[in-house]
Image: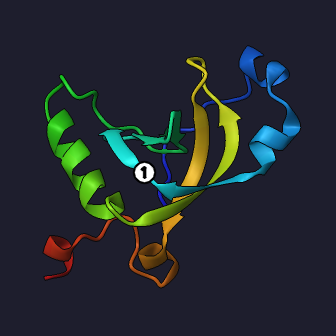
């Protein structure tokens, strides 16, 4: 499971219908940066994960590692909150992770 930085409940949470956070989001996501995905027009911040911004040192490397894990495989995300920017904060996994591959292991790491 992809996890990391947790954003605690905030003022956005009061305006989110509970069903929006309860439903799983599924599909093929596009990696925005090292800790954010886009699933259709929805931005998803990975729960408990903090990576450098794309323009910071190692930001592009963080994005590329996440791409190797996520793209182009279907993922399932379970929303847990919204952050201060309105993005869904979620725990996400793909079939490889469900089978025990683990988020931190790419082919390079296993090889």
Considering the numbered disc 1 on the image, is that residue within a helix, a strand or a loop? loop
Q: Where's residue 43, x and y in %?
A: 50, 34
- 40 w.r.t. 12: above or below: below
**Towards the viewer: 1 or 25:** 25
Q: Is residue 111 above or below residue 55?
A: below
| Furthest residue in direction front, as rendered | 40
The correct choice, above or below, for 65 with respect to 51 in the image is: below
Q: Judge from the rendering whether residue 111 lies leftward or rightward of residue 43; answer left or right.
A: left
Residue 92, given in percent of the width and then of the height, sits at 54, 57
Q: Residue at x 19, y 75 (%)?
A: 107
- How many tags in the picture? 1
Residue at 42%, 77% in the rendered image: 96
The reply, left or right, for residue 20 in relation to residue 62 is right
Q: Which residue is mark 1?
A: 29
Where is residue 18 drawn, in percent x and y?
A: 86, 37
Graded by Cα atoms within 10 Å as few (under 14), some (14 to 19) or many (20 or more), the crowding at tag 1 reads many
Q: Is residue 20 left or right of residue 109?
A: right
Q: Quadrant of the C terminus?
A: bottom left
Q: Is residue 78 left or right of residue 106?
A: right
**Colour scheme in use:** rainbow
Residue under the point 55% across and 44% down: 47
- Residue 102 figure quarter: bottom left
Residue in the picture at 31% in, 63% down: 69
Residue 59 picture quarter: top left
Residue 104 or residue 43, whichever sits in front? 43
């Amino acid at each position: 499971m992809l996890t990391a930085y947790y954003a605690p409940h905030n003022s956005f949470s009061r305006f989110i219908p509970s069903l929006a956070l309860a439903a799983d989001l599924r599909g093929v996501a596009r990696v925005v940066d090292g800790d954010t995905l886009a699933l259709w027009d929805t931005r998803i911040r990975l729960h408990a994960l903090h990576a450098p911004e794309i323009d910071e040192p190692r930001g592009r490397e963080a994005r590329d590692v996440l791409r190797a894990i996520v793209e182009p495989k279907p993922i399932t995300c379970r929303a847990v909150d919204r952050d201060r920017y309105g993005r869904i904060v979620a725990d996400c996994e793909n079939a490889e992770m469900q089978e025990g591959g683990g988020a931190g292991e790419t082919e390079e790491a296993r090889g």
